[in-house]
Image: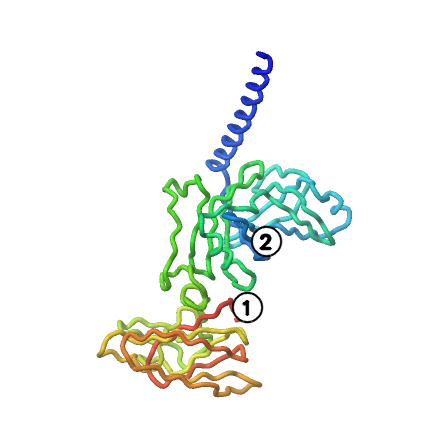
Amino acid sequence: MPVKRYIVLGIALLWIAVACGLIASKNRTISTGTKIILETVPVDPRDFLRGDYVTLRYKINTINLPDPGGEKKQFKSGNIVFVPLAVKDRFWEPQGITATRPVSGTFLTGRVKYSYARRVEVSYGIENYFVPEGKGKEIEQLMRPGRRSLVTVEVLVDKNGRGIIRELRVEPGNISGEKFPAPGIPREGKPVPSPVLRSCGDGVCAETFSSCPSDCGYKVWPYQSDVQSCTSASGKEYPAAGEGAARWFVWNGCGNEKYYLINAAEPVVFNVSTDNCPSCVCQFPEFSVFELIDGQWIHKKDFSLPHTPGLNEKIFYVSSSPRIKIQARGCFYLDVYTKSAVQDR
């Protein structure tokens, strides 16, 4: 009987030692790991949600081989591999794949799922992530194919190439969106805040493109105008076209025409607004929409909204052409949004 007790006690101590070792290893990664940002790609929504965790897929899950010859034999299903990484702009990208552990630099250790032709599919143990209760469906909607929401993951990587997810972020376009920190991992020594639902107009997409294009869509800047620049009421000069262009028409040097490049057959939103004071000038939201068809500008539709202070209305429009022209007949403000980014500007 005493022998059995010792055996049970020994097994229990062994499991405690293993658990302590895992905790210590994770804490070392958290305190000393290299922080990298990875870009995700959409996954099949049928496989996305499993209770309160989400399945993630990264661009680095697929490694392209320059030569699929003898090198491919090293990358059979189940093999341990090492993927060196380097940062490009904002995101870390693979610099190849090897069966030999690198002696320096940042790398992720993974396991081959399968290989075919010139590609190797690798998993890194960071493909599943638990989210706060009730948030799974929201993230699922944002990550479906075609939504174009930018989902990024902050990962801490230790010297052995082991990665731990620190935070998941949902960022529509270049708008900083909802953040989901990993439980128990502090952010810059600060308490981890509880994620909250946002409202339309706060710069964070917690709604849909239809209900809140100003948060969930991409802003389309005019690529051309009939004038070069415009001046605000305070005397500040703005370009009439290009990024940061003036939002108004027909006032303080602004012409009455702006041209926008969009995606044909994709809904866009005209966010029309006016000054919110009785004596202000820009309260005449009247304009026409033209589409460039076979090299000619074709008049498609006229819009005339109430001449009231503080107007803020959204108009959905679908163009058969990737180029449209807005011709204003009075002073008002206009922002154009599209659900997905325009690829060729």
Q: Residue furthest right?
A: 70
Tell me which residue sits at (30%, 71%) in the image: 236
Q: Amino acid at mark 2?
A: Asp
Q: Amino acid at mark 1?
A: Gln
Say above or below: 231 vs 196. below
Badge 2 element: helix
| Labels in figure, total | 2
Report the front residue among 48 and 279: 48
Residue 66 visible in rendering: yes
Quadrant position of the N terminus in the picture: top right
Say above or below: 1 vs 204. above
Badge 1 element: loop
Say above or below: 258 vs 200. below
Query: Where is residue 65 shown, x and y percent of the image?
Result: 70, 51
Residue annotated with mark 1: 343
Query: Where is residue 286 shown, x and y percent of the image?
Result: 36, 84
In the rendered view, does 317 fall on the left or right side of 73? left
Q: Residue furthest front?
A: 1
Tell me which residue sits at (53%, 87%) in the image: 296
Residue annotated with mark 2: 47
By what rule are the colours in the image chosen?
rainbow
* Residue 215 sits in quarter: bottom left
Q: Earlier in the sequence, mark 1 or mark 2?
A: 2
**Label 2: how many residues lie within 10 Å, few (<14), some (14-19) or many (20+)?**
few
Tell me which residue sits at (40%, 80%) in the image: 227
